[in-house]
Image (spheres, rainbow, N blue to C red):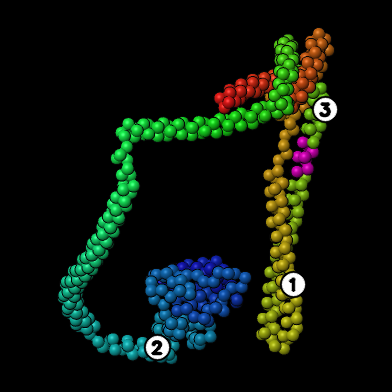
Amino acid sequence: MLIKKAHIDGFGKFVNASFKFGPGLNIVFGPNESGKTTLARFLLYTLGKPSNEALKYRPWGHNIFGGYLETSDGKYVFGEDTAEVPKYDISLLESIAFIMEDDELEAVKVDRGILESTLKKKTEKTSEGRILREAIKRIQTLDMNKCLLAISEEIRKTEEMISVVEEKINKKNTFFVKIKNVETRIKDLQEQINASESNLEELRNAKKSELETKISQLKRNIEAIETELTKYLWIESLDTAVVDEAQNLIYKLNSIKARLEALETEQEKLKEVLQKKDRDIEEKLKQLGASSVDDLESVGLRLKHLSLLTKMYNERVGNVVDEDPLWRLFLENENILEQAEEEEQRYKETINEIESTKLSLQNEIERNEQTAKYSKDLSVVSASAGFVLFVLGLLFKGISLFMYTPAVVFLALAVFLMFNWKRKMASVEVLQERLVEVSMKQPQQPSVWKVLANYGITNIKQLRKKYTEFLEWKAQNIERQRLLNELKDIEQEVIKELSKFGVTGAAQMIVSAVENLQRTFGEVQELLYEKESLERRLS
């Protein structure tokens, strides 16, 4: 066997280490405590079967324990015993393949004969070695070719016999399976036939009983009809004309009843429609601000007045619309500049407050994470120190008391630091959730800027410039200002009249509000006309 490579994930002082070996003699040298014996033990325990003795080489502070060897026979994995590559007993490997530090060597010179003789002596000291030596002696005196030929012939004959027996067994199994299938099929068919005969007999009896019951019922019905006919024998003595007249009267009576029922149904439907019309009228009257139908005349007069005011308003609006539409917004709200500046200032203050909160949360998170890291590191160091002192106390019984006391202190400190680390990490999670909430919170844009954005104004500088132009325009257009004042007076009067109808809103809604009221007034009149028609039909 040729060892090509040794990779150690964790074994003794080696962690994630690799060693490559070439053909011939490979010499591993180094100072004391450098790991030469550890490497030899890794090779021994990897080539050998799993042993509990290897657990003492588990590295401290490292979770991975093991590695693998790449050899000319295959890959040997530490701690695994699979059928892919054969592994050997540790005692056998120690006796014939390893010379450890505590073994006696008579010479250091590497010589094949000396090495073979030394290994032979070491081998003969064990029972496995003596068995191996005896087997080698016997093998040297045997004619292996003759034995192998005889064994091969016996194996061939045995295989031929096995093949013949397998063919016979397969044929018998095939016939047996077919017979079992046929028997199962016959049994199933017999059960189906029995079930069908039973069902047929039950159906025959049930049908017979049903027919007998129906015949008896028909006989009783015939007798009842004959008995009933005896009561009407006197009809034969009546005149045919009288019977026809009575029949016609019955037909007319049924027709009148049907007509009456139809009229009652129609009356109920008309009442429901009339009630719905009353509800619609009440709803429309509420929209018009009227308490009853008697108030419709005054409502109509007020609507005519509103229509006239709206017409005057539209005429003056047509005279003013030639200028920049933004001036109209400024006229409606002359303090819009101060309002925009105040809202902009509040908006910036809100953003600054959010940024300040985010910065303070981030600083708090970093501070808690740093404290948690220090607590975790110190807890690991304290736990390690406590464990080391505890082990030393076990090893040195004379000073165990002096070792156990600091060990308990260090372990208690480690537990305290671990709880502190957990508490700080929980605080970090809470602060991170708070930071996410603050980051997602976005202040709403001031409403005045949403209106100004429709006119192409997006910042306070543009607003100030436009407002300056508005003031210049206002100073240069005295006549237009007079018209605007009239327009504003009319607008206020219209809004005042609309408020009597329960309509509130900006000046831009005047025309639509008046049209809506006029449309509602027309709908009320139509509903009243329909109601009168329905009442006439009911009367």
Q: Is residue 81 above or below residue 311?
A: below
Q: Is residue 46 above or below residue 218?
A: below
Check disc 3: other Cα within 10 Å, few if <14, some if 14-19, many if 20+: few
Q: Secondary structure at mark 2?
A: helix
Which of labels 3 and 1 is toward the front? 3
In which quadrant of the rendered image does the N terminus lie?
bottom left
Name the magenta segment's main secondary structure.
helix
Residue 9 versus residue 207: which sits nearer the camera?
Answer: 207
Give the number of the disc on residue 128. 2
x, y percent for residue 237? 30, 39
Residue 390 versus residue 346: which sits nearer the camera?
Answer: 346
**Sequence-first tag of 3 and 1:** 3
Q: Are marks 1 and 2 in contact (CB under 8 Å)?
A: no
x, y percent for residue 67? 50, 70
Which residues are the magenta region?
347-355
Q: Secondary structure at mark 1?
A: helix
Quadrant assignment, res 81: bottom left
- Residue 193 appears left or right of 370: left
> Pointer 3: what residue?
338
Residue shown at 42% from the left, 80% from the top? 88
Q: Is residue 493 above or below residue 82?
A: above
> Pointer 1: what residue?
413
Check disc 1: other Cα within 10 Å, few if <14, some if 14-19, many if 20+: some
- Residue 326 appears left or right of 257: right
Which of labels 2 and 3 is toward the front? 3
Residue shown at 42% from the left, 34% from the top? 254
Quadrant assignment, res 538: top right
Question: For residue 354: magenta?
Answer: yes
Q: CA distance from mark 2 to mark 3?
A: 105 Å
Q: Secondary structure at mark 3?
A: helix
